[in-house]
Image (spheres, grey):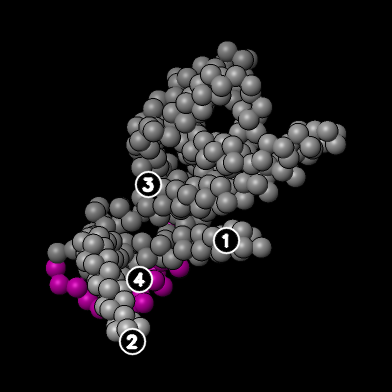
Amino acid sequence: MRQAAVPGRKAQTVKRAIRGYVFILPALLFYGLFELWPIIQTVWYSFYNWNGIDESTFIGLGNYIRVFTDSELLGSIGHAFYLIIFFSVIPVCLGLIVAALIKDVRSQVGKGVAQVCLFLPRIIPGAAAGVAWTWMLADTGTVNQILQGLGLGGITRSWLGEQSTALPAVGVIGCWLQLGFCIVLLLSGIGAIDQSLYEAASLDGAGWWRQLFSITIPGLRGQIGVCFTMTIVAALASFDVVFMSTQGGPGTSTMVPGVMVYRLAFQQNRVGLASALAVVLMALVLLVVGPLQRLVEGKKER
């Protein structure tokens, strides 16, 4: 009886497995067709000199050598890493402080209003934010009017129009977009921390900053990892904000890989070089985000 039951269970297990594969097959086909195949094509094009229309010429690693030796292309990668400060580091640090402050607000209505107000920038498309901030950072924009009202008219300028201030100004737009996401995610994590830890710390005389570094930050390690991952990817792959606010200018002071890929492929018809830069950008994102994820997961397992 037992020997007859074993093959029956195996057959049921095989049927369940086949049924599961049948259910995920459409998703796998969709993923392969619209995610993996474009990546494979991009890698393939990166080894060719091609204008997108005429016959292509195989040049091996020529495009990659150009990416790592051309100062303009290397500069765009450097700008993307510089934007990590504004897109990732500042929003996560500010988000931690603001989320900890909102946690102490006793009014539930006040908490809800604060969360909604702080999350609003996140639901605005990056392109729309870029256009709006372009007006605000113009010569006669809101930012300069406020500075003049505060008696700081001497430092007013066209923030996006000068090479020395354009990239930090783009970074401010990115910081404004990412801050709300970080706050809401960190607030959800704070809600899962045992509140008795804060009560015990208060009884022991621990102040606000001590509680932040000893309870809040260790308890939010997973959420902080997610925040850094999402915001670093947003910085390295930034396109809409930069394109709508400066289009990489003035000069190349705000040029980032995303805008450079668009310019090379669709304005200069250098599809092979654009593909190589896109592949390098993808590799950089994986090199930065991969170790970060392993660090967070490793800490969780301990």
Q: Earlier in the sequence, mark 3 or mark 4?
A: 4
Q: Secondary structure at mark 2?
A: helix
Q: Position of residue 109 (x, y in %)?
A: 53, 19
Q: Are marks 3 and 2 in contact (CB under 8 Å)?
A: no
Q: Earlier in the sequence, mark 2 or mark 1?
A: 2
Q: Earlier in the sequence, mark 1 or mark 4?
A: 4
Check the picture and name the quadrant holding the C terminus. Answer: bottom right
Q: Residue at x 63, y 15 (%)?
A: 151
Q: Closer to us: mark 1 or mark 3?
A: 1
> In the rendering, which numbered label is found on residue 297?
1
Q: Residue at x 31, y 62 (%)?
A: 274
Q: Position of residue 273 (x, y in %)?
A: 32, 65
Q: Secondary structure at mark 1?
A: helix
Outermost residue, left direction? 54
- Is residue 61 magenta-colored? yes
Q: Residue at x 41, y 48 (%)?
A: 238
Image height of 112 relative to 204, above or below: above
Residue 209's quadrant in the figure?
top right
Please name the residue that numbered disc 2 is placed on.
Answer: 3
Q: Earlier in the sequence, mark 4 or mark 2?
A: 2
Please name the residue that numbered disc 3 is placed on.
Answer: 239
Please name the residue that numbered disc 4 is placed on.
Answer: 63
Q: Earlier in the sequence, mark 1 or mark 3?
A: 3
Q: Closer to us: mark 4 or mark 2?
A: 2
Q: Secondary structure at mark 4?
A: helix
Relative depth, front residue between 21 and 136:
21
State which region is magenta.
54-72
Q: Closer to us: mark 1 or mark 4?
A: 1
- The kind of residue on which mark 3 rests is Phe
Label 3, label 2: how far apart the Cα atoms are: 63 Å
